Amino acid sequence: MANTSTRTLRLLSLLQTHRFWPGEELAGRLDVSARTLRRDIDRLRELGYPVEAQRGVDGGYQLAAGAALPPLVIDDEEAVALAVGLQAAAAGGVEGIAEASVRVLAKVVQVMPARLRRRVDALRAMTVPAAWDAPGAEPGIDPDGLTAVALACRDSEHLRFRYRAADGRQSARLVEPHRLVCLGRRWYLVAYDLDRQAWRTFRLDRLSAPLPGGTRFRPRELPAADYAEFVRDGANTAPRPYQVEALVEAPAATVRSAVGRWGTVEEVTAERCRLRMTADSLDWPAMALGALGAEFRVIEPPALRDHLAEWAERFARSAAG
């Protein structure tokens, strides 16, 4: 049996990994009696950890929300993941937490052993941050929603939420959430959709009002080598984005300066250029072309010409009062 201090830290670590632990299973993990487990639980409470007990045949223990945040116990892998995640958050991937992420990151790195700090530095050097400040950048993710989804994945608990499809249609979903995947500039939830009886990938920026379903589930076997591969395969089979081409009656340098890296510009003559763009929606190319302040002719796709005609009619009605 481990000494009391080591066992207490082990107990704290176990309580942090699941929302609820049956007493018998927790005692077995620690290789102690139920009586010793109760003493260790009392010791944690004296240190300020709000451990709740549920009595009865199905009794057990869980960490509850307290008045203050007590120290947490994390292992080496979790410490590295925490530091890398905080760096990503500090870069602006999640709305409203960049400044707080920088402060927490400074505290974590300060107390890290040298071996872990080297790993964090290596990951930082080999990671290219995504750009979030350009037109058309992905919307930020609500931190509370992200946390709620992550907790449901951790606890293997059913999750309910509202979901907006690419065409704008809203639907209510009940899923078994398995993993969160950050791919490119987007966060995805990989889950088993209980209503459709199939695996699905959900973009978190289209997900709203996530609520735990209150029941646990046994994780299923994913029909892919790993979760990132599953998300990539889904992205590869999704409808391809629009390939836009237009002739613009303006110098190439002027157009290039206006669209930046969101399009490629090829000079045709001194006063004419060819603009090519890739977009998931026709709204962005329409706005970009309209903002150039120059005459242009759409070559591809024909759908963009129809889109512009619809906008033109709407603007004309608005201008006419």
Image (cartoon, rainbow, N blue to C red):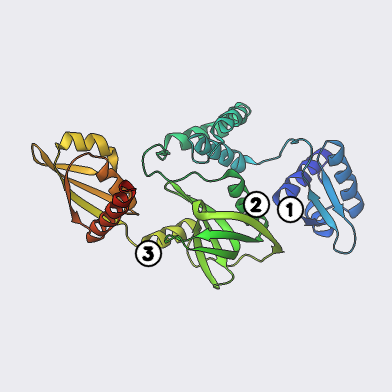
Q: Amino acid at mark 1?
A: Arg
Residue on which disc 2 sits: 151
On screen, residue 279 versus residue 249, left or right, reads: right
Question: At x 54% / y 40%, what residue is drawn?
Answer: 85
Disc 1/disc 3 C-alpha distance (Å): 36 Å
Q: Which mark is residue 237?
A: 3
Q: Local crowd at mark 1 within 10 Å, few (<14), some, or many (≥20)?
A: some
Q: Residue furthest left?
A: 269
Query: Dots 2 and 1: beta carbons under 8 Å?
Result: yes
Q: Answer whether labels 3 and 2 touch (C-beta < 8 Å).
A: no
Residue 9 location (% of width, % of height): 77, 41
Along the line of sight, which residue is nearer the eye, 261 or 304? 304
**In this image, 85 relative to 246: left or right?**
right
**Residue 37 place in picture, x, y as percent:** 87, 50
Q: Earlier in the sequence, mark 3 or mark 2?
A: 2
**Residue visible at 45% across and 49% down in the picture:** 186
Tell which circle, 2 or 1, labels the residue nearer the N-terminal end: 1
Which residue is situated farthest in the right direction here?
A: 35
Q: Position of residue 195 (x, y in %)?
A: 58, 72
Q: Closest to the observer: 297 or 205?
A: 297
Residue at position x 46%, y 45% in the image:
139
Taking 53 as reference, is 72 left or right? Answer: left
The number of numbered discs placed on residues in the rendered structure image is: 3
Q: Pointers 1 and 3 in contact (CB under 8 A)?
A: no
- Image quadrant of residue 265? top left
Task: Tell me the distance, in whole angstroms, between the alpha carbons under discs 3 and 2.
Answer: 29 Å
Q: Quadrant of residue 193?
A: bottom right
Vertical comparison of 67 with 15: above or below: above
Numbered tag placed on residue 19 in the rendering:
1
Callout 3: SS: helix
Q: Position of residue 276 (x, y in %)?
A: 21, 48
